[in-house]
Image: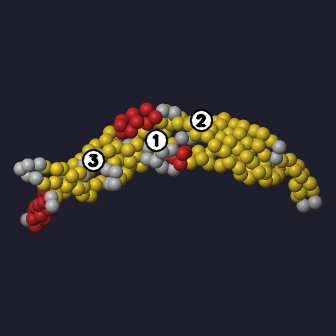
Amino acid sequence: MRLRVILSICLFAVSLTATSARAADVELDVNQVVLQNFISTVGTVGISGGDTTTVPIPVPGICWWGPVPYPCIQHINCSAGYNYSISASNIHVQIIPGAIPFSGDASAQASAEFCGISISASYSPAFNGLLSATWNSGSQQLWFAMQTLNIEIYIDLFGDHITLGYVDVSSHLPNPLYKMSLPLAQTIPLGPPINKNITVTLVSPNVTLLQGYLRFATNLQFTSP
């Protein structure tokens, strides 16, 4: 008998919670295909630049084991000036719970001069990162931006992998990349015989990332002077 009473109380509590939960006034779902179509339309993205750094260069040398000399590889520091170009294409975007990851094809070229040596390299670096989705209340827009995406710039010399630096691709791109306008907050003028303005204000706007889509939800508040 006591178990039945406990079960009845639990079921009543669950029913009460479900009944009292209030859905948002407005819910808008944005499928990941929208982002994919936008990125595909942007197409291949290319950036280039240059910088200077100090790199360790392997050179033949003589090392000592106690009083006994033997040939070895030593490193000397050289000032290096380098140039690079990076291109990204075939970017694939997904929306998953809590994140918007992307991946794609990338190619990079690097050339450097140091200690009288000129060397260049071409390679395909790993290209994957994250997009962010936020609500900008001032402009009433969903903003989609690329988060930090570092690409390594390097060369190979005598079998040594020499990192020249890293390029943050996102810092070279517009921020945000894509703006989706949702002008829900507004003032609605009503003429005769009402003769008043109705102001629509957003209350608790929220962006949630789900499997395959983004959901924007908000409540609306209507006021009139």
**199 to the left or right of 46:** left
The earlier-in-sequence mark between 1 and 3 is 1
Q: Which residue is mark 2?
A: 107
Which is nearer the eye, 86 or 16? Answer: 86
Which is nearer the eye, 222 or 119? Answer: 222
Q: Which residue is mark 1?
A: 102
Residue at far left of view: 193
Question: What kind of colouring is applied to the model shown?
Answer: secondary structure
What amino acid does circle 2 point to? Ser
Give the Cα distance between marks 1 and 3. Answer: 28 Å
Give the Cα distance between marks 3 and 2. Answer: 40 Å
What amino acid does circle 1 point to? Phe
Of discs 3 and 2, which sits in the foreground? 3
SS state under label 2: strand
Q: Which residue is mark 3?
A: 183
Q: Residues within 10 Å of mark 3 (few under 14, many from 20)?
A: few
The earlier-in-sequence mark between 1 and 2 is 1
Q: Is residue 28 visible?
A: yes
Q: Residues within 10 Å of mark 1 (few under 14, many from 20)?
A: some
Residue 37 vertical position relative to residue 195 in the rendered view, above or below: above
The earlier-in-sequence mark between 3 and 2 is 2
Query: The N terminus appears in which quarter of the rendering?
Result: bottom left
SS state under label 1: strand
**14 to the left or right of 204:** left
What amino acid does circle 3 point to? Pro
Residue 18 vertical position relative to residue 167 in the rendered view, above or below: below
Q: Residue at x 88, y 58 (%)?
A: 65
